[in-house]
Amino acid sequence: MRLFAHLGYAAVSMRQIAAEVGVQAGALYNYTADKQSLLMSLMELHMQDVLDARQAARSEGTPLARLESFVKFHIGFHLARPDALLVSYMELRNLEPENFAKIEALRRDYENELERILSDGTAQGIFSLDDPKIATLAIISMLNGVVHWFRPDGRLEQVDIEEIYWGMVRRAVGATDWSDGSVCCLDKGAIA
Amino acid sequence: MRLFAHLGYAAVSMRQIAAEVGVQAGALYNYTADKQSLLMSLMELHMQDVLDARQAARSEGTPLARLESFVKFHIGFHLARPDALLVSYMELRNLEPENFAKIEALRRDYENELERILSDGTAQGIFSLDDPKIATLAIISMLNGVVHWFRPDGRLEQVDIEEIYWGMVRRAVGATDWSDGSVCCLDKGAIA
DNA sequence: GTCTATAAGTAGATAGAC
DNA sequence: GTCTATCTACTTATAGAC
């Protein structure tokens, strides 16, 4: 996973992988049918990991509370697995069509929760979104970007990063009902 | 550029590139010293393209106006060149160190404008951002995500997409002074 | 279950004819 | 300036000894 994340699937040879785990190339084939299966296993296990962890963490509540839970979960979960996130989003094009379809389905399951939250919140007038579908993709992209700059020994702790991103997402969706009692995005008339 | 964008630099052979442009592999070496130089040329020309176009389009004004200009420029420019954007952000790891440093410097020049806008707006109290540096990266990530789903023949026009993303960014930065006269992100006391 | 050796194919890059 | 042919190295994957 580390090699695929840093160098890319196509640029990594079975010999490099073997050297990294301390065996010769031939020995790898006792554990995987071929290189493609290895990539697929890594991605499938990770996606199942994400879905299971999210299932355990999700809870009912207002769309705003569910959104906060989702955003902080996504950041926190992937800050602990930056390589897996990089591979999951950058190596999709190296999956054979059948494998691609499976991973895409899992990814969609995961992202559907966010889309549902945004749709619910918009329907209830809690969020102000023109297009919850695109907002879903935009938010996921924004959150995923964290892996490109995050360093475990950097100036920010995980919780700081969760709060910064949560603040931006909360505002981006135009939430009108803030947990701290403040309000957002009223037009002039509403105030006057 | 199309091959690198869809298949990845490492997965594309010089023979494939030659076939795509209608020559034999050997003929390519009349135009590029080697494969790495070809990637570097593509990326460098694109980055210079972005910087030149942005230089021509940028204007003075409030941080909010400058932010709107930047966001819509970024979306519009890259919707016309999705392959170039994909390569610029996904093939950085395939650049040799010296080339990587050059491209990174150009990318930083470009993104520095956004960071400056966010810093200025925060200093003036127009935006509410905890960390303009991270907000810069978050916004760029969000905007770049558009290439993963955009299809020229899809349901949305370029201008629709610009507006949707601009709306999300405008709210994400916590802008208090809206061009249409509405306000955002006042706390309860300010209204009462 | 790991090794060495190797098969069969492809990679980037070059040489020299035309 | 493009071609064919080729060099050298490396690729994935397999075979068979231990």
Image (tube, coloured by chain):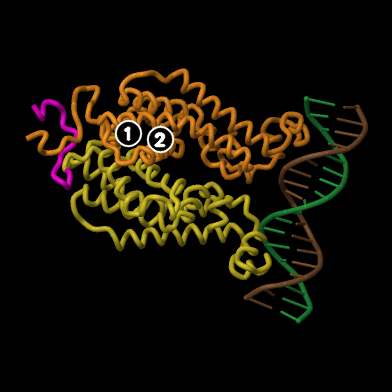
Chain colours: A yellow, B orange, C brown, D green
Camera-side residue of A42 and B38: B38
Residue B140, position in %: x, y?
41, 36
Residue found 56% across the figure and 41% down from its top: B92
Residue wearing tag 2: B143
Residue at the extreme left of the image, as rendered: B192
Mark 2–mark 1 contact, CB under 8 Å? Answer: yes
A183 inside magenta stretch: yes
Q: Is residue D11 left or right of residue B61?
A: right
Q: Mark on residue B169?
A: 1
Q: Is residue B157 visible?
A: no
Q: Earlier in the sequence, mark 2 or mark 1?
A: 2
Magenta span of residues: A178-192
Residue found 40% across the figure and 55% down from its top: A78
Majority SS type along the magenta span: loop
Marks 2/1 same chain: yes
Q: Residues within 10 Å of mark 2 (few under 14, many from 20)?
A: many
Camera-side residue of B16 and B106: B106
A125 inside magenta stretch: no
Residue found 6% across the figure and 35% down from its top: B192
Residue found 16% across the figure and 35% down from its top: B186
Relative to A43, does residue B50 appear above or below in the rendering? above
Residue type at mark 2 is: Leu
Residue B62, position in %: x, y?
31, 22
Residue type at mark 1 is: Val
Q: Which quadrant of the view contains residue A18?
A: bottom right
Element type at marker 1?
A: helix
Q: Label 2 is found on which chain of the structure?
A: B
Element type at marker 2?
A: helix
